[in-house]
């Protein structure tokens, strides 16, 4: 299955960015993110029959609407300079490509073959650290013989978390549908930039966390573990049974249950292989709804922290699934409580409370006696319904990135289940696929 690149260009904002906005100062929450790109690919089936002219119009239309979107998302047309973004209007990289096959042929591929092709739909290597001259946004639009379209995007994590990514996609899609006259939609997806109001850059990390992305990419594989809503319900009922009523006193979310299930399997694997390390889980937590008053959904930049949970080696024999559910619940509750208080005091913020989970995470990543696993939930985000004029995506995917032991959870096609995109080294992946608990609950 061949994909050929036709055009590569830089798309700039339709109107120049004001000189007063030239310097975009990043916040503490931007600064703590790894210097990598976040990949997202949306696949669309289009109803058109006469492909050539229509696809040319689609490509041109997407380029023009992207240029309009960059007027509001002007930092994405700039370059990251270390402590700020130079909003220089150098532009986002925009690539046009053609797939010499139909979208249905790709979607019908066996899982392993499909996953191996994902990078072909991306405009750049998401695991490669960004350089000064690199764009903060890369886009690749691939047209299929059937008229379908894949929009592959990589956005710098130094500027955006997934909530920001979605606001950008929604803004672009709204402009692509030519409904800018709808003022409520325009305002809903217009970015609000004020993250330094909550926490300016503190320079706590001093670049101490470095990941060899080439080594990671060469030794890691990606698999998708699917868990249906009905199966998750059964797992929840088991966790909340009378036998566990004194341990789990809340109703676990579907994400919490799948994180616990995977973590249990990973701990059991390490134990079986004789590894003598503590196990550390970090979960990304969106802070927009954790502060008082809540930040709006279109609050842009990074506004996330990490809820951390750890199992010592001496505890691994006594760890059951319900205990892990409680640990994960307690860690997120602690973040909600601590951050709500610390960020609400606008004048005197508790910087120690705000920075503690980040420093704890960094220390664990660099500790040779700790195995770290990173979990992010992309469930319930708006990219599932992003409509550029051809309806909602037929499929959506991420891909491998330059970070080991990473799991991204996404809603399944029905919406009540979870697709866990798991990145591990090859040996671990083979063992995970054979884990009895994973086998019992995945599709």
Image (cartoon, rainbow, N blue to C red):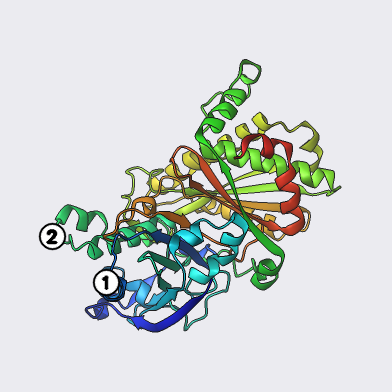
Q: Is residue 300 left or right of residue 305?
A: left
Q: Residue most toward the top?
A: 242
Given residues 289 and 39, the one toward you in this image is 39
Q: Residue most toward the left?
A: 181
From this view, report whether residue 74 is shown above or below residue 274.
below
> Where is residue 177 drawn, in percent x and y?
22, 61
From this view, report whether residue 257 is shown above or below residue 123.
above
From this view, report whether residue 251 is shown above or below residue 15.
above
> Where is residue 115 drawn, in percent x and y?
58, 60
Residue at mark 1:
54
Near mark 1 (Cα within 10 A), the count class, few <14, some 14-19 or many ≥20, is few
Q: Residue most toward the front?
A: 49
Q: Quadrant of the C terminus?
A: top right
Q: Secondary structure at mark 2?
A: loop
Where residue 181 is drawn, which disc sits there?
2
Q: Earlier in the sequence, mark 2 or mark 1?
A: 1
> Where is residue 401 drawn, in percent x and y?
58, 64
Residue visible at 54% across and 46% down in the picture? 419
**Image quadrant in which you'd find residue 103:** bottom left
Near mark 2 (Cα within 10 A), the count class, few <14, some 14-19 or many ≥20, is few
> Where is residue 275 drawn, in percent x and y?
83, 49
Number of marks:
2
Q: CA distance from mark 2 to mark 1?
A: 24 Å
Q: Secondary structure at mark 1?
A: helix
Select label 2 or label 1 by which is in front.
1
Residue visible at 69% across and 36% down in the picture? 437
């Amino acid at each position: 299955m061949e994909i050929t690149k036709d055009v590569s260009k830089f798309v700039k904002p339709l109107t120049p960015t004001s000189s007063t906005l030239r310097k975009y100062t990043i916040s503490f929450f931007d600064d703590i993110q790894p210097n990598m790109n976040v990949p997202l690919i949306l696949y669309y089936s289009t109803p058109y029959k006469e492909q050539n002219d229509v696809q040319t119009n689609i490509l041109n239309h997407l380029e023009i609407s992207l240029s309009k979107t960059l007027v509001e998302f002007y930092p994405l047309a700039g370059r990251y300079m270390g402590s700020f973004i130079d909003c220089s209007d150098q532009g986002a990289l925009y690539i046009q490509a053609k797939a010499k096959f139909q979208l249905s042929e790709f979607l019908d591929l066996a899982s392993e073959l499909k996953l191996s092709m994902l990078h072909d739909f991306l405009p750049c290597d998401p695991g490669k650290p960004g350089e000064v001259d690199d764009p903060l946004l890369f886009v690749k639009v691939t047209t299929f013989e059937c008229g379908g379209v894949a929009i592959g995007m990589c956005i710098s994590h130094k500027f955006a978390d997934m909530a920001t990514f979605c606001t950008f996609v929604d803004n672009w899609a709204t402009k692509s549908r030519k409904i800018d006259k709808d003022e409520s939609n325009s305002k809903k997806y217009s970015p609000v930039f004020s993250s330094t109001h909550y926490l300016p850059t503190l320079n706590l990390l001093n670049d101490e966390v470095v990941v060899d992305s080439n080594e990671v990419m060469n030794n890691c594989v990606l698999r998708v573990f699917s868990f249906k809503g009905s199966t998750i319900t059964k797992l929840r009922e088991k966790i909340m049974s009378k036998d566990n009523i004194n341990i789990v006193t809340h109703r676990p979310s579907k994400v919490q249950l799948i994180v616990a299930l995977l973590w249990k399997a990973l701990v059991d694997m390490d134990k079986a292989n004789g590894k003598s390390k503590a196990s550390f889980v970090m979960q990304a937590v969106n802070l927009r709804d954790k502060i008082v008053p809540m930040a709006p959904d279109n609050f842009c930049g990074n506004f996330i922290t990490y809820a951390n949970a750890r199992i010592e080696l001496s505890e691994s024999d006594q760890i059951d699934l319900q205990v892990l559910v409680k640990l994960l619940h307690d860690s997120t509750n602690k973040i909600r409580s601590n951050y709500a208080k610390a960020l609400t005091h606008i004048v005197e913020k508790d910087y120690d409370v705000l920075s503690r989970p980040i420093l704890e995470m960094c220390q664990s990543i660099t500790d040779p006696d700790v195995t770290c696993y990173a979990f992010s939930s992309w469930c319930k985000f708006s990219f599932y319904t992003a409509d550029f004029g051809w309806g909602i995506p037929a499929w959506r995917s991420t891909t491998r990135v330059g970070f080991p032991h990473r799991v991204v959870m996404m809603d399944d096609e029905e919406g009540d289940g979870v697709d866990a995109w798991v990145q591990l080294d090859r040996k671990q992946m083979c063992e995970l696929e054979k884990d009895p608990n994973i086998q019992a609950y995945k599709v």
